[in-house]
Amino acid sequence: MLSSHTINKAGKREEDSEQRGCSSFKKKKVEYDQFVRNEIDCFQSEENGSVYFSSFNPVWPILGCGLSDGKVLIIEGKRQADLVSTWENKSWNKVNAISAMTDLGWNMDGSLLLVAFLDGQIVLWNKNTKTSMEIKDPNGEQVWAITWNPSLPTTFATRSDQTVLVWDRAHNQPKAPKQRFTFHSSLLRDLVWISDDQFFSCSDDGLILLCQIGTESPIRSFDHGVDAVLSLSWNNTLNLLGCLSLNGSTMVWSMDKNEPIYLVKSERMKRPTCLAWYLFGDSIAESSWTLIACGLEDGSVVLWDSCGNSDPVLSLLVQTNSIWDISFSPDGMFLTSIDLQGNLVIWSTKTWQIVFQSNLSFRASKRILQWGGGGRKLAIANPSEQIHLIEAVRVRNKH
């Protein structure tokens, strides 16, 4: 049986009146790491600008930062556990770009860092050779965002206004994309890989399309109607697709159903702005992989059970501005949220208590929370000349 809870600004849990005395919340004694905040200068002397993007290497102690002047800063250390401020090897890689940087990210094995620019220029930096190579779509397609395939280290997708390009053989400097997908009639909003050769895309046209490499038309379509679909999140454990729409709906689609298996529509000022699946086991519901977290316009973070009703299983109430991004750490131990004004909160998913809170004093943007170090490091790009880092320091046992 699920029970609904609220955690208020004081960090205390409140149960709904109907559920008092029958909570499934399991209290656990947890030894937390202590999080500390650091800032690292990303520009060389007498230079200034902003840190547009950041991404931790998934394997090695390396942080890549995309800067407003078109350079890519690579910061390398000796051990993942060390604070990034002690990583001594810094290198600035100049890119001969004539347009703004639009995205940056590592592939799944950490061997390639991809940097994209609005005019369609793509730069691949090779970790092993310390060299870079440039590629560009011969048709001049713009690049608004990139998405690496999560299981193939040399395959990635780029998206522009209404087109998705899939590239392969990334380590061999491909001359042209493997395939071009132009199926949407309005602005593309998001793309998520679900297998080696399949991905979902969504658009302002209200369609969610499942595309497959080698196939000339979509192999599946979910029609949301007239409302734009803004964001997608894939549950690879249960093969479920979560999505947010412009009208404030949160939906979950199953691959074997033509209608959403879960739908909740939020009232104005409580509409969801971002979402992420919780796939790590939990202490608030009997089901371990059906929880989906959403940040809302009113500053709260809620968790719904996609196999339950429309009532939140858990509500976290701390921030007062619209939540702009949420993210679970790779090990599932922490959930972090940041609101529009840069107020950041980290929650323990063992007790759902706050373990770190800070005002970063800048206007946040979408998808700026980048975890690394096995879930003990968090990098946050921002308009300043420094990369903001939140890192865990092991608390030593007292004797």
Image (cartoon, rainbow, N blue to C red):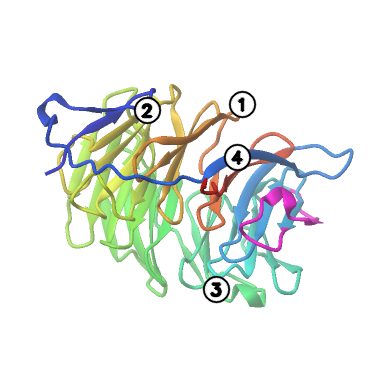
Say if the magenta span includes residue 28: no
Asked if residue 183 lies left or right of residue 102, the reply is left
Q: Amino acid at mark 3?
A: Asp
The residue lying toward the viewer, choosing from 357 and 251, is 357
Q: Give the residue drawn at x 56%, y 54%.
A: 372
Q: Amino acid at mark 1?
A: Ser
Nearest-to-viewer mark from 2 and 1: 2
Give residue 125's position: percent from left, percent from top: 70, 65
Which mark sits nearer the N-terminus, 2 or 1? 2
Q: CA distance from mark 2 to mark 4?
A: 20 Å
Residue assigned mark 4 = 36
Question: Which residue reaches farthest front?
Answer: 399
Asked if residue 80 lies left or right of residue 281, the reply is right
* Predominant SS of the magenta segment: loop
Which mark sits nearer the N-terminus, 3 or 2? 2
Q: Give the residue drawn at x 63%, y 65%.
A: 60
Q: CA distance from mark 4 to mark 1?
A: 16 Å
Which mark sits nearer the N-terminus, 3 or 4? 4
Quarter that holds the N terminus: top left
Q: Amino acid at mark 4?
A: Val
Q: Is residue 269 above or below residue 192?
A: above
Nearest-to-viewer mark from 4 and 1: 4
Give residue 379's position: percent from left, percent from top: 60, 46
Numbered range of the magenta stretch: 76-98
Residue assigned mark 3 = 168
Residue 86: image tag? none
**Is mark 2 in CB contact (under 8 Å) with mark 1?**
no
Residue 265 seen from this side: yes
